[in-house]
Image: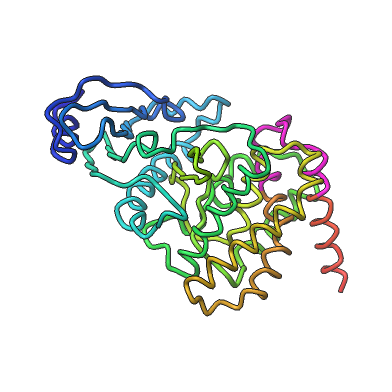
Amino acid sequence: MRKEIKSLILEKTGADRITSVEIVQELWSGFGKLQRIFLDGAAVDSVVVKNIELHGRGEHPRGWDTKNSFNRKLKSYRVEQEWYASYSDRCNDKCRVPKLLGHLSSEDRQIILLEDLDGAGFDLRINQPNIEELKQCLRWLSNFHAQFMMQPAEGLWSQGTYWHLNTRPDEYRAMPDSKLKRQALKIDDALNSSTYITFIHGDAKVTNFCFSDTGSVAAVDFQYVGAGCGIKDVAYLIGSCLSEHDCFRLENELLSFYFQALKEALDAKHSIVEFWELEKEWRKLYPYAWTDFSRFLIGWSPKHHKLNQYSKKMVENVLNNLSILKGR
């Protein structure tokens, strides 16, 4: 371990020494490691270090080793550090995130020192949640969206998510000619023209949630946090863990749960947002958010399992709606 990283950890935790280091996972495209650091003599047993190598190899597992991909990944780590440094302390227990303990940057490396959520009781990882566990994640999103409703996302992505059209020109070019490709800009414009903008997590798949045995959740991985309509997070979360059958079966129940939780969160903040107008707009944009992600997948991985019958139905509905609007 580099001397400056060790010094940061010992200084910020008050530990006497580091006893061991565990690799939690390799970062995407060879940009470093996520590490759990075990301590002796500190108030906590362990902390987590996101050890980012800024001159990473850029070896994309699906072969997208392009300049756009490399630069997007580099910016994502800068955004994540800014998120933790400037915004994460606004999150309360209802949208729990790891506490920032410290950070440092050099020419070739970026270090983000974080609370270990495992040690804070969020030690469960669930890839296939039941409906109650999925609702816990939706409740987290509702509180997160309420917390940052209509706030400027300075220093973050001007458009949250990693798949929006402006950040994926390579994948767009790879798409075969189709009505969806020709309408991609209109779909993007519809999402970006939302009246009600908040911070969106930007990568709210179920594997980025940490569960506790008390029924609460925390979220991690804020590389693509930025401005947007919250329904993008909702669509992406649902798509990350439900089968096409369950997407059809549970759509109304899950959307109603999310909007009720969002209303409660906004009411608790005494928000002046016209909630019923927000709900009307975001419900209308739900199939647009789903279709926008499908557009990305078709260019990025055209045989992806998420391009299922439910996704095709969302795309069909949006394209039909755009045709109707054009004919008026």
Q: In the picture shown, does residue 308 fall above or below 187?
A: above
- Residue 62 placement (x, y as % from top left): 58, 26
Image quadrant holding the C terminus, namely bottom right
Query: The N terminus appears in which quarter of the rendering?
Result: top left
Image location of residue 99, percent across then percent down: 32, 47
- The answer to which of 67 and 189 lies nearer the viewer is 189
Please tell me which residue is depicted at 79% across the width and 37% down the height of the picture: 308
Residue 259 position, x and y percent, is: 65, 63
> Overall secondary structure of the magenta stretch?
helix
**Closest to the observer: 134 or 113?**
134
- In this rendering, would 102 be left or right of 252? left
Q: Is residue 113 magenta?
A: no
Query: In terms of image quadrants, where is residue 106?
Result: top left
**Where does the image place residue 300, in percent across and percent down from the top left?**
64, 35
Q: Decide which of 105, 210 is in the foreground and name it.
A: 210
Position of 254 compared to 102: left or right?
Answer: right
Magenta highlight range: 293-313
Residue at position x 83%, y 55% from top?
Answer: 317
Where, by quadrant of the figure, is residue 220 drawn? top left
Splitting the image into 4 quarters, where does residue 187 fall?
A: bottom right
Up-down: is 239 above or below 20? below
